[in-house]
Structure formats: C-alpha cells, structure tokens
Amino acid sequence: MICLYCHSNIQEEPDIITLFKTPRPLCPVCRELLTEWRAGLRCDFCHRLMEEGWQKCMDCDFLKRRFTPPAKITCLLEYNQTVKMLFHRYKFMGDYALSEVLAELLDIDLRGYDAVIPIPLSENRFRERGYNQTTTVLDQKRIVYKEALATTDRARQSELSKVLRINGENPFSVLNGSQLRDQRLLLVDDIYTTGMTVHHALEKLYTISPSSIDVLTFSKA
C-alpha cells in the first residue's frame, strides 16, 4: 500500500490480522504530522489558538453577538502546514484520493444525531471542482447525510479579507426544512476559519426549529 499523502510505501508485517484488514491510506509519519496540534491556550469552543493578552476568544465573542451559536464545535485537525498542503492538493489541485485520508482520520460518534447536513457547493463551483470536498469525505466514510442547504455563487472565502467575510450576504437557503424540525443536526464543513460560513448556514437552519445543532469541521484554520 502507498501512503496517499507522501506516496511512500507503507511497510506492514503480514500476519493473520493484516491479511484480512483494509489497507490504511496513511503512513505513520504522515498520520503524526497531520494530527499534530501546536501547544498553547485554545478557545474551548472553536479551538482557536488564543493570542497573547486575550482573556476570551474574540472571534467567538463577535459571532455570539451576531448569531445563535451551535451547541458544540468539533474540529478534526489543526490547519498546520501539513494539513494546509493536504487541503490545497485536495480542493484546488484535484487530488480526489485525499478524501480517503480525511475519512481515515474522521472518528466521530453519530448516534446522537438525527441528520448530518453538509455545507453545499454552488452549481458553478461544483462543475469547476468536480466534487464537493465535504460530501466526498462523508461518502468515503459511508456516512448518510441530507443535502438540506443550497448556496449561490460567492467568492472563495480563502480569498476574502475578514471584513469582507463578515459583511457578506448570507448565501444559503434551506431545502425541505420541515423534515428537520425538532431533529438533532450535525452541520459539517471542511475548514473553519473565521466561522462566517458555518454561522451563515446555522442562521438558516435555526429558522426550521431543530432540536439542536452541533458543528463538525475537518480543520480549524
């Protein structure tokens, strides 16, 4: 088996267990690099590394004054240099196979949720990329989800300043929202940066009166 990140051969001693085990897509070195988090004080809600002198997370403080927050945010990976390169290859260079790497690292108990809701791509962005980077990971993990949100074309969030992200219009709309009333929802996105994408989606989902909404993001930038 070849590591899908560094493309080196994964050496595994053959035995009765490995003979029938599905090969893993990551070598031990890449797994360690991808799952490494920098040391330091972090926000206990969004997991941001706190800046010197902060008594509270300024990002969360701003968002909570403007939006109804989720009950909980779970971040799979920190956006370190190795993770940054993974997403660059996966989202912008068409390295579709890296969805297997993210699926391999995705370890979450879904028994507390009635529905998993991925952040959507616009039709134009989907045609441009060829796949939704969030739902592709869920498909690899065989996680059933509901496409309950739609979105219009908008500039890539990574290309916008924080001010433009904050002042942008909400691009989301809800599809068949009545089916999700009183349900426990898990909203899933690939990268949580300022949190505006997630909170715009939450703003729309809260209009259908779910029981609760948690957020899962593959990485915290």
Image: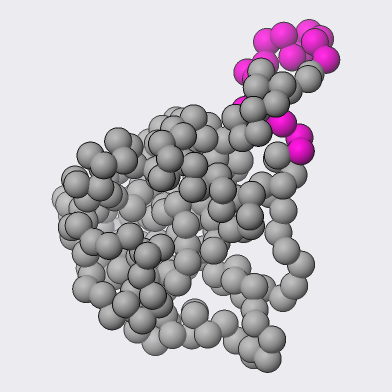
Give coordinates of residue 124: x percent, y percent.
19, 47
Give me the residue at 76% from left, 35% from top.
28
Q: Would residue 165 be visible to someone looking at this image?
A: yes
Q: Quadrant of residue 24?
A: top right
Give the quadrant of the N terminus: top right
Residue 200 in the image: above or below residue 217: below
Q: Main secondary structure of the magenta part?
A: loop
Give the vertical position of 199 relative to 139 (above or below): below
Q: For the point 41% across and 45% down, which residue is it?
A: 92
Residue 151's image quarter? bottom left
Q: Which residues are magenta?
A: 13-29
Residue drawn at (54%, 40%) of the image: 102
Provide residue 19's location: percent of width, then percent of height: 72, 9
Residue nearest the viewer, comparing 100 with 75: 100
Of the 4 image quadrants, the one containing the C terminus is bottom right
Left or right: 127 as drawn, with respect to 10: left
Magenta-colored stretch includes residue 21: yes
Frontmost residue, 172 versus 133: 133
Is 86 rendered above or below residue 13?
below
Nearer the observer, 169 or 91: 91
Residue at 71%, 59% in the rendered image: 37
